[in-house]
Image (cartoon, rainbow, N blue to C red):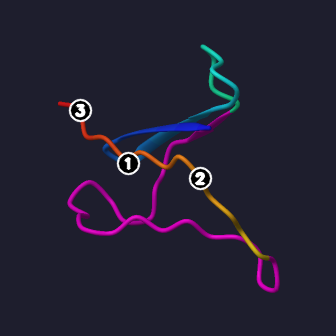
Amino acid sequence: MRIEVSGQHAKLFLDGGSQPVLIINDLFRGTQASGTIVLWVEVGTEGYFSDLKITKTD
């Protein structure tokens, strides 16, 4: 999965796809948020992440 965030908008891409499978137009934290990235799974569910890479592009 690739997630692109710009301002209050996010696009989620799966399996190297060129078109987003989910578009979010109103991120809660707003455009001035900084410092934290949260990976959340449902309560009572274990989540495993591998090969995680976070990059910032201008």
Q: Secondary structure at mark 2?
A: loop
Give the alpha-carbon distance from disc 1 to disc 3, as whole Å: 16 Å
User: At x 48% / y 41%, what residue is drawn?
Assistant: 10
Amino acid type of the residue tagged 2 in the rendering: Ser
* Res. 8 mark: 1
Q: Position of residue 31 (x, y in %)?
A: 26, 54
Task: Say which quadrant the N terminus sits in.
Answer: top right
* Residue on which disc 2 sits: 50
> Earlier along the polypeptide chain: callout 3 or callout 2?
2
Label the magenta part by its dominant secondary structure. Answer: loop
Query: Against 37, is 9 above or below?
Result: above
* Residue on which disc 3 sits: 57
Give, as a single range, the part of the protein colored magenta. Answer: 22-45
User: At x 33% / y 69%, what residue is drawn?
Assistant: 36
Q: Secondary structure at mark 3?
A: loop
Query: Is label 3 or label 2 in front?
Result: 2
